[in-house]
Amino acid sequence: MAMETVPPSQTLHLPRLRRRWQILFLQVIATVALLALLFRMTEVYGPCDDGFLEDGNNWCPSYEHTRGLMWVNEQPSFQDNALSGADGLILPRELVGIDSTGFASQVVPLTMCFLLAGLWMFYQTRGEKVKLWTRRGCTGAVVLWALVPFILDWFDEIGVIGFHIPLQHLGSLFQPLQLAIELFFVGIVFAPILAGLIGIWSLSRRALTWAVGFFLMIIGVHALLTFQGITDSVAGIGLKPLPAQIGEATLYGGLISPLALDLLGIAILILLFHEAGNAVIGHLEYAVMLPDASKSDPEYVRQFNNVVNSHVLHTVSIIGGVALTTALALEFDTLMLDIVAVMEGGQWSGQVSESLELQLTYGKVISAGLFLLAVAGMRYVVPWQRVSGLIEAGIASLRGTRSES
């Protein structure tokens, strides 16, 4: 008897899985989270100090790319580059958005990131011979760019003053350095975006991890700047550090403060980007490792569909739960003080709640630690595993009812 199989469009072969709506949904979610993360990071960490800019300075080491390109544009040593335009930049101004601000300055670089990610995916599918000649061609172009102007200028001057050591033309050898500097300023903002897109659509865990690590490095640097001693020592470079105090919870019924909401949004976007991107890679790796006969087996296909559908549902619900519990953890100290105030009716809780330390970073860390201790202690009162099991059973029953109808 022939083994039962599923239709060809529903098998677990990689080309067909790449077109499944669940896989595409996770990839789109990861891409949207990555783009939203860029916009939030540039809004929170992009501005320079207002007084620094009023003093006539144009560049500070913030998370923004146009100011760095303006600095390159103003350097006299870069004006004589053979490929520089009238403004001294090699990269076209329209391409890097130097004449725009805010979102408008990011549109074209983002479009280039998508194009480069697509070219990288195309490059990865080529044979080793094509890859070898591509690398040789790029290296040869850079070498010719550096050597040809140097040799032409040297020979031209030899015809005028005779043979000599061309020390005055050595600067031509470093012309590609200007392009590297311009790409550096652009890459500070858009390199993790390019790496993230490659990780999502080219299925590269290394690229995903690199992008997340880069974002965490930027966040860590700005977190250090909130300490007063470090803030004072770097006051002259124009960075605009975040406030040391987290602020009063005034949003969503006193659940979270505006600054905490910005930082929580960045954290959730990083988590969503990393989780959705890795989920796609993990599911496709599992399908690739299956024997070829199992990829058409109805039982394997059904199990795979259940796992992917559950992951899509859990991604949305768990991320939402993480955001809510994190907001509760940051304000858990306020809740405890309110309870103490109701029970005692004294002034002690009011004095403690007005303490500056509770509004600082380490005060919120203590608040989150107390929240974790409280939740861990409640396991002796509330059967968390039983509660989560009932929730999952309810979700499964709803899904079963929908499928039957």
Image (cartoon, rainbow, N blue to C red):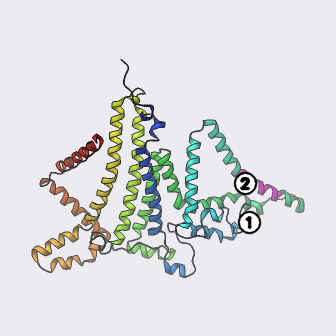
Residue 303: percent from left, percent from top: 33, 36
**What residue range appears in magenta?**
142-154
Instruction: Tell me if mark 2 has few (under 14), some (14-19) or many (20+) residues whose alpha carbon lies within 10 angstroms of its own.
Output: some
Q: In which quarter of the image is residue 107?
A: bottom right
Q: In this view, does 399 lie above or below 7?
A: below
> How far across and how far down the image is residue 194, in percent?
52, 54
Give the mark, 1 or 2, whose residue is nearer the N terminus.
1
Label 1 sits on what residue type? Asp
Which is the main secondary structure of the residues drawn in magenta? helix
Tag count in the figure?
Answer: 2
Quick one: which residue is furthest to the top in this view?
1
Nearest to the observer: residue 119 or residue 235: 119
Q: Residue furthest left?
A: 344
Dot 1, crowdedness within 10 Å: few (<14), some or many (≥20)? some
Q: Is residue 141 above or below residue 13?
A: below
Which quadrant of the figure contains the N terminus?
Answer: top left
In the rendered structure, does residue 145 fall within the stretch colored magenta? yes
- Mark drawn on residue 80: 1
Give the residue type that dot 2 points to.
Trp
Label 2: state its secondary structure.
helix
Q: Mark 2 points at which residue?
A: 145
Spot occupied by residue 83 in the image (x, y as percentages of width and height): 72, 60
Q: Which of 79 and 272 is in front in this view?
A: 272
Question: Residue at coordinates 36% horizontally, 25% vertically from top-left?
Answer: 4
Residue 324 lies, in percent from the top left, at: 28, 61
Q: Which of 104 and 335 is in front in this view?
A: 104
Quadrant where the C terminus lies? top left
Please give left or right for residue 82 compared with residue 243 in the image. Answer: right
Q: Is residue 367 magenta?
A: no
**Residue found 42% across the figure and 39% down from its top:** 284
Which residue corresponds to the image point at 45% horizontal and 62% vertical from the top-left?
218
Provide the secondary structure element on which disc 1 rests. Answer: loop
